[in-house]
Amino acid sequence: MTTYARMDVLLLGTLAGEAHAGEYAVAMRCIEPAYLLFSSVSISFYSFLSGSRDESRRVEREDVIRKVFALVTISALVAATGITLWYEEMLRLISPAYSVSGPILVLLSWSLLFRAWNPQLTAVLNSLGKFRIIAGIAVTNLAVSLAMSFVLIPRYGAMGAAIAIIAVEGLNSAVQLSVVSYYEKGFIMKLLAR
């Protein structure tokens, strides 16, 4: 995630100009704390998952998986909704000059849903020892992000970069969820149980 989220700012400056790069950078900096929060949760989650592979802890493991995914999903929804409703006030508190970043911020805020799930799904795959698969997914994400950026940024500027990030994160979620479901039979049903 870090690589392609950083590359889009560089590509924006080159393909669309510094003004677009600045607008996007403001929006990205406003939501990055949430990204860091979800990554931090995944570190603890991975530790738990790695230590709970024993069949005697299956029920506990499934319960924690449900709780973690519920927590990050609700947190992302609350954050995205709050940003969507109050982005103007939020940006005005920082600097009135940043108001031009508002629409980009709103769009990027909805990437929180995917960015909440992706590190947790990665933690599940890592706990299963599927490191090569994670590496393959990361390389694919980078390639798709670059391709989308080269197509969308010249046409739509900062908004194009935001669309590319959301699309790549959504693809990442779909692929990881599919892979996790393959290795952890019934994973989706476990998330929905209770």
Image (spheres, rainbow, N blue to C red):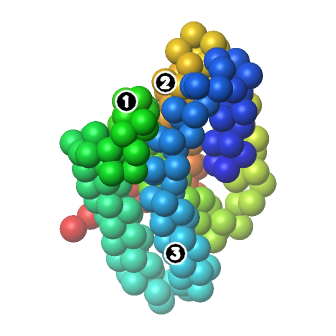
If you read the primary sequence from the N terminus, does the residue marked by circle 1 or circle 3 appear first? 3
The answer to whether 100 is drawn above or below residue 41 in the figure is above
Residue 167 in sight from this viewpoint: no
Residue labelled with disc 3: 45
In the image, residue 35 lies at what x, y percent? 51, 57
Q: Amino acid at mark 3?
A: Phe
SS category of the residue bearing label 2: helix
In the image, residue 25 lies at what x, y percent? 56, 40
The answer to whether 143 is drawn above or below residue 25 in the figure is above
**Image quarter for residue 74?**
bottom left
* Rendered residue at 68%/43% (across/down): 6
Residue labelled with disc 1: 103
Near mark 1 (Cα within 10 A), the count class, few <14, some 14-19 or many ≥20, is some
Q: CA distance from mark 2 to mark 1?
A: 8 Å
In the image, residue 88 lies at what x, y percent? 28, 40
Question: Do callouts 2 and 1 mark residues in contact (Cβ within 8 Å)?
Answer: yes
Instruction: Name the foreground residue: 109 vs 71.
Output: 109
Residue labelled with disc 2: 159
